[in-house]
Image (tube, rainbow, N blue to C red):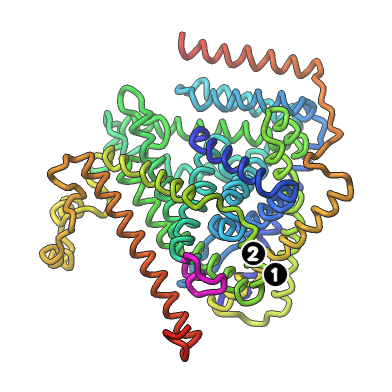
Amino acid sequence: MYVVSAPFWYVAVQRVRKVLTHRTVPALALFSAFTFILMMFNIPLPGGTTGHAVGGTLVAIILGPWAAVLSVSVVLAIQALLFGDGGLTTFGANCFNMAVVLPMVGYFIYKVISGNSDINSARRLAGTIVGSYFGIIAAALVAGLELGLQPLLFHAADGTPLYAPYSLNIAIPAMAIGHLAIAGPAEAIVTGLVFFYLQKSHSAFLSRQASQKDEGKLWFVWAGALVVLAFATPLGLLASGTAWAEWGANELKEILGYIPQGLGRMSGIWHAPLPDYTIPTIGNIAGYILSALIGIAVVGFLLWMLGRWISRKKRIKQNPTSTGVS
Amino acid sequence: MTGGGFLARNIAGFTQALESVLVTENLCRISGFMQSLDPRVKAVTLLIFIIFVGLAQDFPVLIAIFILALVLVLLSKIPVAFFLKRLFIFIPVFTAVIAIPAIFITPGTPLVIIAGQAVITAQGARTAGLLIMRVVDSLSLGLLLIFTTPWTKFLVALRWLRLPSLIVDVLGMTYRYIFLLLHTTNSMFLARQSRTIGGFSGAENRRWLGRALATTMVKSQYLSEEVYLAMLSRGYQGEIRTLNELSLRSRDFIWMAFTLVAVSLMFWSIYR
């Protein structure tokens, strides 16, 4: 995993070095320290549980995605080395999930939703919340993939797994559920609240940061996100057996021993637009990748629509009298 | 009504972090064997051992490495009970989450059959054992490095290993400012707690938390600019210079020779 993270670190160092020069070192150090503190916060969640946030998306929104890659990596390094949490050998994987995937995906979604809207708009705020939520979910899914691939890649001759023993259809849902329910909301709440407060009380700070921030060319972030997605796509082909949450009613019956009532009724109504995620005539592999691309496009479009909708609502609210006149 | 509990929990967390780092720093100052080694030698040799642990697949070798780690702990005058406590904080969680299920889900020869259903396989038990032993070993070696190397010395070693100076400088300064920010946020929580009677709703706590974090963020931004000016006024030109001159001593060479012999012996015992 060090090998996968290395190019991201390299590009991040190059970008940050080029743009921010000497000022970089203290600024990055202070923001890394801030990220460290943020991770320590114990956040009360609705429903009485508590959780911790990573803050990668927040740092990416304020400082730019490349600076976020560096500062979250620095924090993870200090945690691994000083506090002994998170071993040295898993440091590469941890960094890839939390310091590369998380801020990149989070920032990408934030960008798609917020577009060119005003820094103080509700659309920006929605972007931070949705972005940070899905940023951490993406990180969790990638972590699940890494864990799940290990028994496929490393096992002894008699089938004894050498490292983590879980297969993909155990590892991915295990990671996803915890993050959908606890870590995701924690991240979204923290990112949203901090951004909201900054909008209210420190909008000068926000807009100054926005003008200084180096996001590289935006296509770079796009490319990064697509690479991550494309990475993930062929893994679906590797997964033998049933993929999580793609069970038909019959497979559910095999697994659970019965069909949940509601689902039994629903299965007659709902037919997936692309059943089994393959377009029959193209062949399985190409079809799978094509379905994934269509899926990405649909999600992207929905996000864009959401952003449009929120910004229009906001604009009407701001100038109720001057609609259509400019 | 989670107001008081929520504040207290956070304050306790901050204090614990500070304490654990201070204890570590004190251990680094003891004059023991590992503390007296050159940080570069220590980092590289322990890394070799950790990589070896990742490759090793049988119990005698893994147990031998653990014993070696314990001997080094003794030679470095680190309290063994303290060391074991830090080591085994992580093991139960890890065991429950990863190792125990492995006993059951790994296919193979049945070893124990419980209620005709759950099957413990020989391969499963072996997998779980190996996993736990590997984690114990690499954690011990990692802790040994952490407990005997001051952060600044460690950074000199990283610099020597050709890590970009940007990263090493940021690592060094981050460490320094984590303490300042920990202190600042701790004061914020204490101040809030001292003004709190009864409790607040979860939503109110979350809003306050958001404000506290945002304020800390803006504060650290201003601070970074002041720090930058202070660095400039002390002649900063894009590179941090230190007075740490490292030189190898005879015990460094002895330790390197020992590592070489030990690793080749273990390698030979596995692949002969």
Who is closer to the viewer here, B189 or A299?
A299
Q: Which residue is depicted at the point 64% across and 72% down? A: A203
Task: Tell me the subunit letter for badge 1.
Answer: B
Q: Give the structural element (helix, strand or loop) at label 2.
A: helix
- Residue A174 in sight here: yes
Give the alpha-carbon distance from disc 2 to disc 1, as whole Å. Answer: 8 Å
Q: Amino acid at mark 2?
A: Asn
Task: Tell me: A193 left or right of A275.
Answer: right
Which amino acid type is shown beneath numbered disc 1? Phe
Q: Position of residue B253 (x, y in %)?
A: 75, 15
Within the magenta stretch, is there residue B13?
Answer: no
Q: Residue furthest front?
A: A326
* Residue hosting label 2: B10
Q: Residue furthest bottom?
A: A321
Image quarter of residue B48: top right
Callouts 2 and 1 on one subunit: yes
Instruction: Name the side, left or right, on which A144 lies relative to A90.
Output: left
Q: In this rendering, would A161 be left or right of A126? A: left
Q: Are marks 2 and 1 in contact (CB under 8 Å)?
A: yes
Residue that mark 1 sits on: B189
Examine the image and state in which quarter residue B140 appears. Answer: top right
Q: Earlier in the sequence, mark 2 or mark 1?
A: 2
Question: For the magenta stretch, what is the residue range?
Answer: A114-127
Residue B20 visible, this orientation: no
The image position of residue A157, as x and y in percent, is 32, 22
Q: Does the segment drawn in magenta span residue A115?
A: yes
> Which percent across, then down, holds residue A17?
67, 43
Q: Is residue B51 above or below residue B239?
A: above
Give the residue displayed 74% in from the left and 43% down from the top.
B172
Q: Chain of mark 2?
A: B
